[in-house]
C-alpha cells in the first residue's frame, strides 16, 4: 500500500511538472487527488457523477475530465497497464455516446423509449483501444420503423437532427472542457450521405459498393451504443462482406494496395527523431495494426478465431495459428505497447490529438513524464522498436531489396532527377494509378489521358516545394473521383495549370480537400483572370443569378454554390500562388458571401411569396455582424446574421396561405438560412450563426425593427452593443437599410443602458479565453494579443467614447488612431494578424507551424523576409495589441 502511494505521489509530481493539461486537472479535482490510491482502482466508477439535476452535456464533460486525470495517474504510476487504460477510455466513450444518443432522442420525443438508432464503433473505439486524447469514428444507423420522432417530422429528418444533437453534446466545449471529438466521415460516401443512415441503405452499400479499406475498418467494428440490437443485426448481416472465405488474386492485390498506400501516403518527413510520427511513421503504430489486419483479412474468412478486433489479441491469435512468426508477433506486441504508451504521454501534455514526438524542451518533458531523464533517452528507448517494426512490415510486401540505389528502377531514377526525395514511394503511387487501383483510372480512355498528362504534371510537381506531399494529395483526389478523364485532359491542354495545381497540392490542404470533393473547381483557374481580384458585389450577384430557360429555384441554388465554390477556391489559390495580398482576398471572400446572400435571399423571398404572398408595407432586412459585417472573411468563416422585418408586427400576408407577420418572417428566415447552409448536389455554402440576435438562442429568429430598437435601447448587454459596432445591412431596400442604420447609429451614439463597459468587456474576454483557448501557437485570432483582443480593445473604446464607428475593423482603428485613442502601431498589427489568419486557414487550419516548404510562402503572404521574421513579428504585434487592450480595459467614459 505504501508503495502504491509513493508511485502515485511520484506520478502526480511528474504530471504537474511536465504536463500543463494534467496540472490543470490536478488543480481542479482536489477531492479526486486526495483519494487517488482508491480512484485508480476503478477510474470509471470514480469519474461518475450521481446528480440527475445536472445537464447531461455538463455532467459528461466533467466525468470525462475526471476520467482523464484518473487514467493518466493510474498509467503514469504503473497501477494501470496499457490494456486497462485503453479499455477504460473506450468504455467511457461507449457510455458517453450511449447517453448522448438517449438524451438526443428524448429531447425530440419526450417520454419515448430511446431506440431505433445505433452507433457502430470503428477504429480504436471498436477494438477497445482508444487513445488518451482520441476522437471516435462511429457510423450512425437508424431503423425508420422504430426511431421515435415528432408527428410533423419525416423520420429521416428526425434521425439527422438527433445525430447533430449527439455531436453537439459530445463536442461542445466550455470551461469544463469537452466530452469527445466525433468524426462521422467513415460512413459510406460521406460527401453526399446524411450523417445518420437507414440501416438497410448502409447494408446495401457494404454488400455492393464498398472499398477494400472499408473491409479493413470493419475488422474492429462493434455495436457500441444506442440500440445495440439494431447495431448487432447490421454487423451480422454484413459479416460476409468483411470475412470472405474464398480469396482470389484480385483480393490479395487489394490487400497489398492497402499496405503500400498507407506507407506511401505518409512517407514524407518520417525520419526517426524529434518530430517522428508515432502513428504513421515508418515502423510506427499504424504498421503494427496493418500487419495484423492484412493477415486477418487473408485468413480470417476461413478461421473465425483470427477475427479478434484488438491489435494485441490479433497478433496473439495469428501467432497461435501459425499464420505469423511467433518471434515477430512478440516484437510487434512489445513495440505496440511502448508506442501507444508514449503516444499517451505526448497527448497528456496539452490534451491534443497528436501522434508526433515534439522537439527540444517539449520532448524532454515527454521523457520526464515517462520517468526518463531526457528526450535523448526516450529516443534511445524507441529506436530499436521502430527499426524492428519497419523491417517486419517491409518484409510483408517484399520491399527490403528496393532500399538501396542498385535496386532503383528507371522510373525511380527519373523521379529522382525530377526532384522527388523518395522516388521509390512516388513510383509505387504512379504504378498503382497505372494498374487501375482507383475506379477513376480503370477505363482505357482514362489511362490514355493520364499517360499524356503525366510528364508535364510530374515535372511541375517535382519543381514544387514539397513533391512528396503534393503527389500524396493528388493520390487522395484520384481515389475520390468517379472519373479522372476530364482532369487529365485539362492538365494536358493547360501545362501552366499543372504548375499551379502542384503549388496548391504542396501548400494548401484546405484547397486540396476541396478539389478532392469537386475536381471541377480546377476549371475556374483556366483563365488568367482567376488570379485577379473578384468583382463587386453587384457583378458577382449578376453572375450567380444568371438563369437559363426552365431553371427553377433548385437550379439557382446549385448555380450559386457553383459560383461561390469557384470564387472561394480561386481566392485561396491567389494567396498560395503569391498573386494577391491576403487582406484583398479576405475582402473578396466577403463580397462573394454578400452576393450569394443577396441572390439567395431575393429568390427565397419570391419563392415564399408564391404561396404566402407578402406582408404589406413590410420587408425582410438582414444584418451582418462580426467578420462578415466588417467585410473581411477567411476561407472557413461562417456568417453572423440578424434577421429583422419592418412594418407592423400585427399585420398579415396577402397570399393564398396568409400568415401573421411574425410567423411569416420567421419561416421565411428559416428558408433563407437553409438556402445558405443546406448542401445540394453542387456542394455546401456557409454555416450561418444567428446567436447574436436579440435574446440570443432563446429569442425568436426574426424580430421587428421596432422590437430590435427597443431591445437595443433597454435590454441589450455590452457584448451585444460591441457586436453592433460591426453591424452592416446586407439585404433590404434602400429605405429598409436606412431605417436599420438609423436605429444602430442612435444606439451607438448613446441611446442604450448605462453600463461599466470596460469592466464588462474585461470579464467577457476572460470568460471567452477560458471557453475557447487558442488552437495552436500560430492562432492569430485567439492567442493573447491576437485579433480577438484587438477587437475587444477597439469596440470598448468605441462604446466608451462614442466615436470611431465603422463596420470595417481597419477603418475603425484608423478613426480611433486619429483621435489618439489607439497608438499608431495598431493598424500594422491588425494587417499582419489578419494576413496571418487568412493564410493559415488555408495552409495549417490547426494553427500549428506548417512544413518547411510552406513557411516561405506564409512569410511572403504576410510581408516577412523569412519564417524567423514571421515568428518575431507575431510576437511584436501581439505585444502591441496586448498593451492596447490593457489600455482600453481601463477606459472611462467622458
Image (cartoon, rainbow, N blue to C red):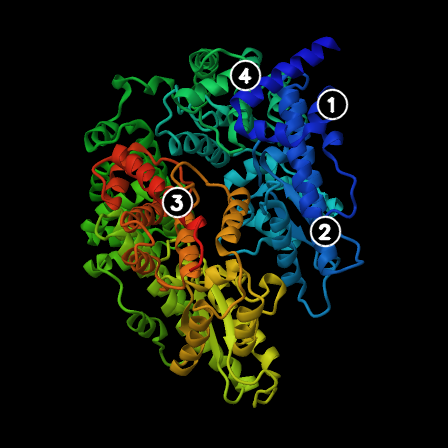
Q: Which residue is mark 2?
A: 103
Compute the Cα span from label 3 to label 1.
40 Å
Q: Is residue 229 visible?
A: yes
| Helix, strand or loop for disc 2 | helix
477 or 81, nearer to the observer: 81
211 or 349, nearer to the observer: 349
Q: Is residue 439 visible?
A: no
The quadrant in which residue 38 appears is: top right
Q: Which sits earlier in the primary sequence, circle 4 or circle 3?
A: 4
Q: Quadrant of the N terminus?
A: top right
Compute the Cα span from label 4 to label 3.
34 Å
Residue at x-position 35% and y-position 54%: 519
Compute the Cα span from label 1 to label 2.
31 Å
Residue 568 in percent (x, y) is at: 34, 58
Residue 35 is tagged as 1
| Helix, strand or loop for disc 4 | loop
Bin the neighbour count of mark 2 within 10 Å (Cα to Cα): few under 14, some 14-19, many 20 and up: many
Residue 163 in percent (x, y) is at: 63, 53
Bin the neighbour count of mark 3 within 10 Å (Cα to Cα): few under 14, some 14-19, many 20 and up: many
Compute the Cα span from label 4 to label 2.
39 Å
Residue 278 in percent (x, y) is at: 47, 25
- Labels 3 & 1 near each other (Cβ < 8 A): no
Q: Which residue is mark 3?
A: 786
Q: Which sits earlier in the primary sequence, circle 3 or circle 1?
A: 1
Residue 470 in percent (x, y) is at: 31, 39
Q: Quadrant of the C terminus?
A: bottom left
Amino acid at each position: 500500500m505504501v508503495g502504491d502511494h509513493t508511485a502515485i505521489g511520484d506520478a502526480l509530481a511528474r504530471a504537474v511538472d511536465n504536463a500543463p493539461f494534467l496540472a490543470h486537472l490536478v488543480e481542479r479535482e482536489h477531492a479526486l487527488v486526495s483519494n487517488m490510491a482508491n480512484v485508480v482502482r476503478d477510474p470509471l466508477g470514480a469519474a461518475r457523477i450521481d446528480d440527475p439535476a445536472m445537464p447531461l452535456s455538463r455532467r459528461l464533460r466533467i466525468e470525462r475530465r475526471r476520467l482523464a486525470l484518473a487514467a493518466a495517474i493510474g498509467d503514469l504510476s504503473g497501477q494501470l497497464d496499457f490494456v486497462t487504460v485503453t479499455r477504460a477510455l473506450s468504455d467511457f466513450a461507449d457510455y458517453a455516446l450511449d447517453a448522448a444518443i438517449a438524451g438526443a432522442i428524448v429531447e425530440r420525443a419526450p417520454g419515448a423509449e430511446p431506440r431505433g438508432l445505433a452507433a457502430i464503433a470503428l477504429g480504436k473505439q471498436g477494438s477497445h483501444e482508444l487513445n488518451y486524447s482520441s476522437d471516435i469514428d462511429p457510423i450512425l444507423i437508424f431503423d425508420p420503423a422504430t426511431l421515435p420522432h415528432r408527428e410533423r417530422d419525416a423520420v429521416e429528418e428526425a434521425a439527422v437532427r438527433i445525430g447533430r444533437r449527439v455531436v453537439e453534446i459530445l463536442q461542445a466545449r466550455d470551461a469544463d472542457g469537452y466530452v469527445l471529438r466525433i468524426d462521422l466521415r467513415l460512413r459510406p460516401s460521406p460527401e453526399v450521405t446524411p450523417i445518420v443512415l437507414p440501416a438497410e441503405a448502409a447494408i446495401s452499400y457494404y454488400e455492393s459498393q464498398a472499398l477494400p479499406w472499408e473491409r479493413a475498418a470493419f475488422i474492429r467494428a462493434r455495436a457500441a451504443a444506442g440500440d445495440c440490437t439494431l447495431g448487432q443485426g447490421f454487423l451480422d448481416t454484413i459479416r460476409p462482406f468483411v470475412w470472405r472465405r474464398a480469396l482470389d488474386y484480385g483480393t490479395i492485390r487489394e490487400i497489398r494496395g492497402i499496405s503500400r498506400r498507407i506507407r506511401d501516403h505518409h512517407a514524407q518527413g518520417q525520419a526517426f527523431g524529434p518530430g517522428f510520427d508515432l502513428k504513421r511513421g515508418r515502423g510506427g503504430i499504424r504498421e503494427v495494426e496493418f500487419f495484423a489486419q492484412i493477415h486477418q483479412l487473408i485468413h480470417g474468412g476461413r478461421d473465425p478465431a483470427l477475427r479478434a478486433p484488438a491489435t494485441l489479441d490479433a497478433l496473439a491469435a495469428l501467432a497461435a495459428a501459425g499464420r505469423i512468426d511467433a518471434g515477430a508477433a512478440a516484437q510487434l506486441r512489445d513495440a505496440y505497447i511502448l508506442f501507444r504508451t508514449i503516444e499517451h504521454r505526448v497527448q497528456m501534455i496539452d490534451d491534443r490529438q497528436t501522434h508526433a514526438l515534439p522537439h527540444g524542451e517539449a520532448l524532454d518533458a515527454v521523457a520526464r513524464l515517462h520517468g526518463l531523464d531526457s528526450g535523448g533517452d526516450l529516443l534511445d528507448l524507441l529506436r530499436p522498436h521502430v527499426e524492428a517494426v519497419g523491417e517486419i512490415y517491409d518484409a510483408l510486401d517484399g520491399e527490403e531489396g528496393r532500399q538501396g540505389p542498385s535496386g532503383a528502377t528507371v522510373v525511380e531514377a527519373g523521379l529522382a532527377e525530377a526532384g522527388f526525395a523518395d522516388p521509390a514511394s512516388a513510383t509505387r503511387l504512379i504504378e498503382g494509378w497505372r494498374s487501375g487501383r482507383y475506379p477513376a483510372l480503370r477505363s482505357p480512355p482514362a489511362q490514355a489521358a493520364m499517360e499524356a498528362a503525366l510528364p508535364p504534371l510530374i515535372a511541375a510537381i517535382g519543381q514544387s516545394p514539397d513533391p512528396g506531399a503534393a503527389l500524396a494529395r493528388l493520390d487522395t483526389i484520384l481515389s475520390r473521383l468517379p472519373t479522372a478523364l476530364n482532369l487529365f485532359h485539362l492538365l494536358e491542354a493547360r501545362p501552366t495549370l499543372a504548375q499551379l495545381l502542384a503549388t496548391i497540392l504542396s501548400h494548401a490542404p484546405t484547397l486540396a480537400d476541396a478539389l478532392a470533393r469537386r475536381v471541377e473547381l480546377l476549371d475556374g483557374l483556366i483563365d488568367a483572370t482567376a488570379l485577379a481580384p473578384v468583382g463587386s458585389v453587384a457583378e458577382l450577384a449578376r453572375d450567380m443569378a444568371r438563369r437559363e430557360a426552365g431553371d427553377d429555384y433548385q437550379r439557382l441554388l446549385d448555380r450559386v454554390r457553383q459560383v461561390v465554390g469557384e470564387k472561394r477556391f480561386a481566392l485561396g489559390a491567389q494567396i498560395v500562388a503569391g498573386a494577391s495580398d491576403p487582406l484583398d482576398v479576405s475582402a473578396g471572400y466577403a463580397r462573394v458571401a454578400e452576393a450569394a446572400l443577396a441572390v439567395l435571399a431575393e429568390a427565397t423571398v419570391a419563392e415564399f411569396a408564391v404561396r404566402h404572398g407578402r406582408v404589406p408595407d413590410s420587408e425582410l432586412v438582414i444584418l451582418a455582424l462580426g467578420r462578415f459585417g466588417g467585410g473581411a472573411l477567411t476561407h472557413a468563416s461562417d456568417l453572423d446574421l440578424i434577421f429583422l422585418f419592418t412594418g407592423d408586427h400585427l399585420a398579415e400576408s396577402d397570399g393564398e396561405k396568409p400568415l401573421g407577420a411574425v410567423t411569416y418572417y420567421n419561416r421565411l428566415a428559416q428558408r433563407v438560412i437553409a438556402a445558405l447552409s443546406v448542401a445540394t448536389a453542387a456542394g455546401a455554402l456557409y454555416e450561418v450563426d444567428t446567436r447574436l440576435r436579440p435574446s440570443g438562442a432563446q429569442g425568436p429568429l426574426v424580430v421587428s425593427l421596432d422590437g430590435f430598437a427597443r431591445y437595443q435601447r433597454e435590454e441589450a448587454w455590452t457584448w451585444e452593443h460591441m457586436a453592433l459596432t460591426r453591424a452592416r445591412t446586407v439585404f433590404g431596400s434602400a429605405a429598409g437599410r436606412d431605417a436599420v442604420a438609423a436605429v444602430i447609429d442612435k444606439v451607438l451614439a448613446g441611446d442604450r443602458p448605462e453600463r461599466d463597459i470596460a469592466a464588462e468587456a474585461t470579464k467577457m474576454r476572460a470568460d471567452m479565453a477560458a471557453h475557447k483557448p487558442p488552437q495552436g501557437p500560430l492562432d492569430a485570432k485567439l492567442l493573447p494579443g491576437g485579433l480577438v483582443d484587438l477587437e475587444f480593445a477597439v469596440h470598448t473604446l468605441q462604446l466608451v467614447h462614442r466615436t470611431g464607428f465603422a463596420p470595417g475593423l481597419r477603418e475603425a482603428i484608423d478613426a480611433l488612431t486619429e483621435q489618439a485613442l489607439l497608438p499608431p502601431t495598431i493598424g500594422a498589427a491588425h494587417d499582419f494578424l489578419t494576413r496571418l489568419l487568412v493564410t493559415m486557414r488555408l495552409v495549417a487550419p490547426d494553427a500549428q507551424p506548417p512544413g518547411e516548404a510552406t513557411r516561405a510562402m506564409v512569410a511572403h503572404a504576410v510581408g516577412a523576409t523569412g519564417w524567423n521574421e514571421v515568428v518575431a513579428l507575431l510576437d511584436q504585434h501581439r505585444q502591441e495589441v496586448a498593451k492596447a487592450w490593457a489600455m482600453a480595459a481601463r477606459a472611462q467614459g467622458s
